[in-house]
Every structure is written in C-alpha cells, then in structure tokens.
Image (tube, grey):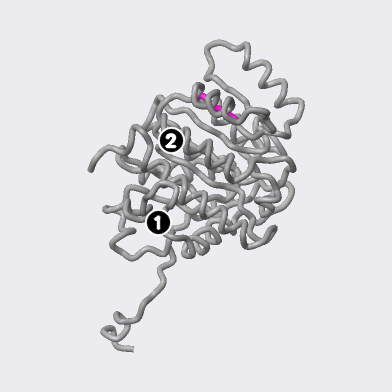
Amino acid sequence: MPEAAASRIPWTPFNFLALPPDQCELENSRAVLIPVPYDSTASFRGGAREGPAAMIEASGALEDYDLELDLDVSQIGIHTAPFVEPHLGSPELMVQRVRQAVATYLRPDRVVGVLGGEHSLSAGAVQAHLEQYPELSVLYLDAHADLRDEYMGTQWGHASGARRIHARCPLVLVGVRSICEEERDYLEAQSNATGSPEISSFFWPVNDADSLTRGVIRRLSDPVYVSVDLDVFDPSVMAAVGTPEPGGMSWIQVTGLLRAVAESRRIVGFDVCELAPREGPTACTYTAAKLVYKLIAYASRSTAGLPPR
C-alpha cells in the first residue's frame, strides 16, 4: 500500500486513551504512564502481568472528558512509555529496574504513574519519587497491610511492599481488612517508635467516611504518592485481582478519598496494581483504566497544581 494512501486511513494507537501523536508525545505530556507486566511473586492467583496491556486497551473506550471535574483529561498530554521488561533475576532487582524506569521520566512539572503488575513494584516507584521529592509521603490503598518483613523467601515480594516503603518515608494505609500477626505486631510497635517514619493505618470498614478522609489528609505530608492495589475495592466491584478480600471499598468511596487528597495535597505520582483481567468480568478492566484516568485528572487539578511549563 502506498504511504500516501496509508496516511489517510484512521489508525487506532495502542496507548492510554488511544491518543493521537500530538497528545501523547513525551515532550508535550504532563503525565507519563509506565506499564510493568510482572507478577513473579504472586502467591494465590497469577495474571497481574496481563493487567497493564488490558488497562491500556480498555482505556480506548473511555471518554476523554471527565464530567466530575469538567476537564478533558487528554489535554494535559499523556505519554505511554514502552513496557518495562521483567527482570527474572530476583524481585529486588525488579524493584530496582522500576526505580530506574520511573526516574527516567520524573521532572517537577509531570506526574508519573505505573501500571502494574503486582504491588511489589510500588517500592521501586516510591524510591524514585523520593529522590525527586524528599518530603514525600505515601497513601497506600490495599485490602492487605503488605507489612511482612519477608514472605516466601524474599523481602521484595507483594506481601512486603508497604514494609519496604515505610523504611524510607511516612506511610498511610487505607482499606486494610486482612493482616497477619506479624503485621499487627509491627503496627503496634511502630505506634510507640521514635525516630522512624510515621505509619498510620485505617482499617476497613469504617463508620464515618468523612472522619476517615480528614484523618488521612492530616497524616499526609506534601507532596503525596498514591499506591493502589485494586483489591482495596470490594470483590463485587473488582473481582479481577490475585487476592480478593470481601468487605471492601466502593468506587465512590475510593475516588471520593482520592479527590479530597488532591484538593489539599499535591499528587506527584501513583501506581495502580494487581489487575488480573482473566479473573473477573471485562467491567473490572474498564474500572481499573477509569481509576488511572481519574488519578491523572485529580493530580492535574490538585490545589498546589503542576507548575507551569
């Protein structure tokens, strides 16, 4: 086919929101998404390695315009980076690879998001952000505490991500409804510890969502990194995860919290992890893509805002 004829055919790009080149070129984008197809430490149901591609594919069906915020999210420019190749040498080496990948795209006028993959990847993304933002705190939404020092022979797996993050910066856990005794003891010990980063936990369910939101914001420094394990949602909303836990948060509860955080803190980075698309209906994949879209929107409209170009 002649090139001139090919140029007249409407092609569908494989990037987040299926954006045309002028809205996804790196130099014009104030948001970058990094897909990381990795789930090598999965301990129950695998498949999160298929999550990044599924979210990108589903995002092509989203409207660019966000009704809640009266904002065309695509106008800020969203660049979808190449997929990060998994490092099979060890989970720790994979975390470091994610740190390097995120650091490549970080700059003060840009929000960087990771599309997981399993939740162990968050530790690498947070490390990269800490190098750019030393005052960073992390909002960690998860059904599980992820505070084991070691699990199944590694300190860098999906059950230890929050523990590795807390070693470096303040951490606020929200949505937790399943922990082991080691994690309970760790939280109790940290409540009396001095000289270490703060850690706060908001177990789910709660009686007063407004009170929880105020408590979360009070404990977050500025800026904020948001880490979301999709199992924070109730399985009726999000069944397509590796370790579903009943009694979780609703879509309105999660997005309401994230919007409130963005209204008082600057969100500089995020991840959305643990989508295992084969474990649930297609609606789960669409919901995960929508959450990524909402996080980009909230970050771009935060009170502090992104600095002007």
Among the 4 quarters of the image, the one containing residue 306: top left
Residue 65, numbered circle: 1
Image coordinates for residue 135, horizontal then vertical, percent? 41, 24
Tell us which disc is closer to us: 1 or 2.
1
Left or right position of 92 against 66: right
Residue at 47 percent of width and 28 percent of height: 137
Q: What stretch is highlighted in magenta?
A: 169-173
| Residue 217 appears anywhere in the view | yes
- What's the amino acid at mark 1? Tyr
The residue nearer to you, when weighing 269 against 10, is 10
Residue lying furthest right in this view? 181
Residue at 23 percent of width and 43 percent of height: 309
Image coordinates for residue 308, horizontal then vertical, percent? 24, 40
Image quadrant where one finds the N terminus:
bottom left
Mark 1 neighbour class, 10 Å CA radius: few under 14, some 14 to 19, many 20 or more: some
User: Which residue is tagged 2?
Assistant: 262
Q: In this view, does 248 lie above or below 287?
A: above
